[in-house]
Amino acid sequence: MSLDESTRAQIDSLVKSNDVMLFMKGNRGAPQCGFSATVVQILDSLVPSYATADVLSDPALRDGIKVYSSWPTIPQLYVKGEFIGGCDIIQELFGSGELHEKLGIEIDPDARPAIRVSDQAADALRKAVEGAGRGDGRELHLGIDARYQATLTMAPRSPHDIEVEANGVRLLIDPLSASRAEGVSIEAVDTGRGVGFKIENPNAPDAD
C-alpha cells in the first residue's frame, strides 16, 4: 500500500510538532480498544500531557500510519520524532525503565517518601486490606500519576516497588510515584456510603 502525500504530510506534522505523539483508537479520555487503553494508562503515569490522534475517525490516517512506520498495528507511539513501537514494546520499555529515559524522566529508585496516615485512616486501611483477602497475592499500593492524581489500589507486588510503612500500614509505591509522594497525607472521610480516603499531596502543582 502506498502513502499519499497529503496523509504523509499530516502524519509528519503530528510527529514533528508533538514531543509525545500517540496514534490510537479513540482518545485519551475514551480509548476504544484495550491496547490503546493500556498505553494511555502508562503515559498518564509518566507525563502530564501528550497528543493523540484517533485513527478510527480517519480511515486514511489509520491505514497511512501503518505504512509510515512500517508497523502493522495500533496504537503507535512516537517520542521526539522517534518511533517507539506498539503496546507490547511500550509495556516492555516501561517495565525496564527505558521509556522513562526516552521521555527524559529521572527517578530515584531508592526514594523513601515520608507519608502520614491518620489513625482513623490507618484503621480503615487495615480493615480494607483484610477484607480484600491476603491469600491472593495482592497488596496495598499508592499510585500518583503525572497529574498528581492519587489512587489506593490492591495489586500484586512489582519487583521495583518501594515499601513504605506509615502508622502501621504498609504501602507499596512504584519509584516514579515515590518521587511525587513526599509529604502525602491520607485521611479517612465519611462518604455517606461508608469510609473513603482523602489524599492530599503538597507537591501537586495547584497545592498551596
Image (cartoon, rainbow, N blue to C red):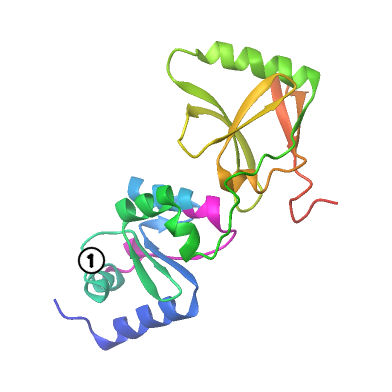
| Residue occupying image coordinates x 50% and y 64% | 103
| Residue occupying image coordinates x 80% and y 24% | 118
The quarter of the displayed image where residue 59 is located: bottom left
User: Residue lying furthest bottom in this view?
Assistant: 5
Q: From what the image shows, is residue 15 above or below residue 103?
A: below
Q: Is residue 7 left or right of residue 120?
A: left
The quarter of the displayed image where residue 56 is located: bottom left
Secondary structure beneath label 1: loop
Q: How many marks?
A: 1
Q: Is residue 141 left or right of residue 31?
A: right
Mark 1 neighbour density, 10 Å: few (under 14) some (14–19) many (20 or more): some
Q: From what the image shows, is residue 114 above or below residue 53?
A: above
Q: Whole-percent x and y of residue 114? A: 74, 37
Residue 194 in view: no
Q: Is residue 48 left or right of residue 199?
A: left
Q: In this picture, which residue range is highlighted in magenta?
A: 43-59
Q: Whole-percent x and y of residue 89? A: 32, 55
Nearer the observer, 200 or 101: 101
Image quadrant holding the N terminus, namely bottom left
Q: Whole-percent x and y of residue 127? A: 64, 12
Q: Whole-percent x and y of residue 203? A: 75, 50
- For disc 1, the marked residue is 71
Q: From what the image shows, is residue 42 above or below residue 99?
A: above
Residue 24 in view: yes
Nearer the observer, 63 or 103: 103
| Residue occupying image coordinates x 42% and y 17% | 136
| Magenta stretch encompasses residue 109 | no
Q: Amino acid at mark 1?
A: Trp
User: Residue lying furthest front in this view?
Assistant: 110
| Residue occupying image coordinates x 77% and y 24% | 189
Q: Is residue 176 left or right of residue 180?
A: left
